[in-house]
Image: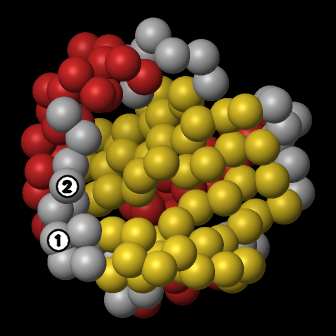
Amino acid sequence: MRICPMAETDCEQTEILMKECFSVPWSVDALKEMFHTKGYCSFLAKEETEVIGYIGMKVVLDEADITNVAVLPAYRKKGIARKLLQQLLDEARQQGIYSIYLEVRDSNAAAITLYKHAGFKEVGKRKNYYEHPQEDARLMLWQS
């Protein structure tokens, strides 16, 4: 398994990953739009040529928002999300980003634990943030 920057040619495989991981996945067009919009940064986990994980952030000045973190179900609990998150945090430091926000489903205990171990702190809630099923989000913040 290797972590690499996402290329526009990876969009179709990344859409397949997102369809397996999210009730409201990003489309190929939405993924391709990232490459034509300033401030997006994303990394993939690949097993040979198969996309098995994704993480992305949108940067504005010295802050960023993590847009999505996804790992195929068959590859979970193997440290892939942790490696993707570490790669993203390293990139953020290199870009001079001092604050990173993210939202996570209240019920996603594994992700909440991952983020807390990486230094994120819970700073708020967003009522009914998620759809299908409707659920609150925890707002978390990492600061370097």
Q: CA distance from mark 1 to mark 2?
A: 7 Å
| Residue 41 falls in image quadrant | top right
Q: Nearer the viewer, residue 72 or 128?
A: 128
According to the image, label 2 marks what residue?
24
Image quarter in which the C terminus is found: bottom right
* Amino acid identity at mark 1: His
Check if mark 1's residue and mark 2's residue have beta carbons within 8 Å.
yes
- Residue displayed at 61% across by 48% down: 65
Question: Callout 2, which amino acid?
Answer: Val
The answer to whether 96 is drawn above or below residue 76 in the figure is: above
Q: Quadrant of residue 16?
A: top left
Q: Is residue 68 left or right of residue 22?
A: right
Front residue (pair 43, 21) = 21
SS class, disc 2 = loop
- Of the two numbered discs 1 and 2 on the same chain, state the one appearing first in sequence: 2
Instruction: Examine the rendering and report whether any part of residue 50 can be seen.
Output: no
Provide the residue designation for mark 1: 132
As drawn, the label of residue 141 is none
The residue under the point 73% across, 78% down is 123
- The residue sitting at the front extreme is 127
Mark 1 Cα-neighbour bin, 10 Å: few <14, some 14–19, many ≥20:
few
Horizontal and vertical percent position of residue 49: 19, 30
Instruction: Please provide percent x and percent y for residue 60.
Output: 73, 33
> In this view of the protein, which residue sits in the foreground, 39 or 92?
39
Q: Residue at x 19, y 34 (%)?
A: 27
Could you classify mark 2 by the number of other residues whose Cα lies within 10 Å: few (under 14), some (14-19), or many (20 or more)?
A: few
| Residue 50 to residue 32: above or below | below
Could you tell whether 48 is left or right of 123 in the image? left
